[in-house]
Image (cartoon, grey):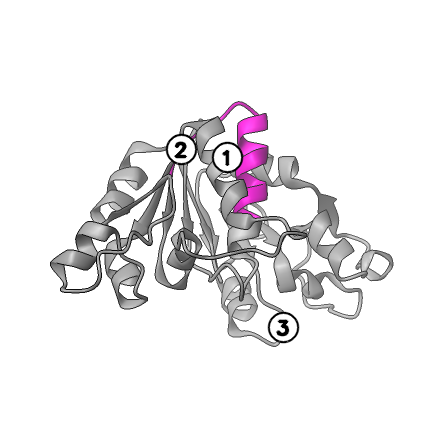
Amino acid sequence: MLHIINKATPDASLEQCLALIDPQQDAVLLVADGVLSALASYAYWPRGLAVFVLSRDIEARAINAYLAPHIQIIDDAGFVALTEQHTQSISW
Amino acid sequence: MKYALLVNGAPLDSQAARSALYFSQALLAREHQLLRVFFYGAGVQLGNGLQISAQDENSLLGEWQALALAGNTELVLCIAAAQRRGILSATEAQRHGKPPVEMLATGFTLAGLGTLVDAALDVDRLITFQG
């Protein structure tokens, strides 16, 4: 399952998403204001969970240098690739 | 793979329509099929053909129309959401006793939620872009 989050914390969507997530199988993609949760100062990601951010959206917010180390940066083609790998997605 | 998209966010007030456009362009570049994009809620404002973009700005509407041509993609506005926002085809306007102005942008159609359900059953992936 691919979880797509487009809202900045504090917003209930990320909390609800993390309550349901399976870190072994699921992935999180942060887009739009959701990318703010990729900042190193946000430390609540479950261990082992794959977290991706859309490069265009971090560049637009000038936060490239401040991301947590385990966050993976992808472009639109990478976004499409994630939807190829995950049969289902939820946009929170 | 066959894809359909659901776009819920208003084009000028959220990133939804622009993010969905970039995703769609990447889909076509990876040789996927994009059968239908269903605009729902405030997302229907993209299909207002009377909108005018500043000359020195990109036209989001124009880019979607170009994408639909390139991908042979159906652009569908939820008819109920469109009516509530006054986005009517000339025939719909006349049917409701309004001046018969064609507000629907070229390349867009009005249809019910059933077309979203049809698309969901027909495609391999349905991706939602929230506002």
Residue B123 lies in quadrant = top left
Where does label 1 land, which residue?
B67
Q: Is residue B4 above or below residue A34?
A: above
Give the residues in magenta: B19-36
Q: CA distance from mark 3 to mark 2?
A: 35 Å
Q: Amino acid at mark 1?
A: Leu
Residue type at the position of mark 3: Thr
Q: Dot 3 corresponds to which residue?
A: A9
B56 displayed left or right of A88: right
**Chain of the residue on which disc 3 is drawn:** A
Few, some or many C-alpha atoms within 10 Å of disc 2 (few <14, some 14-19, many ≥20)? many
Residue B73, labelled with which disc?
2
Q: Is residue B74 above or below residue A26?
A: above
Can the viewer see residue A11?
Answer: yes
Q: Which residue occupies the foreground of this view, A9 or B18?
A: B18
Chain designation of label 1: B
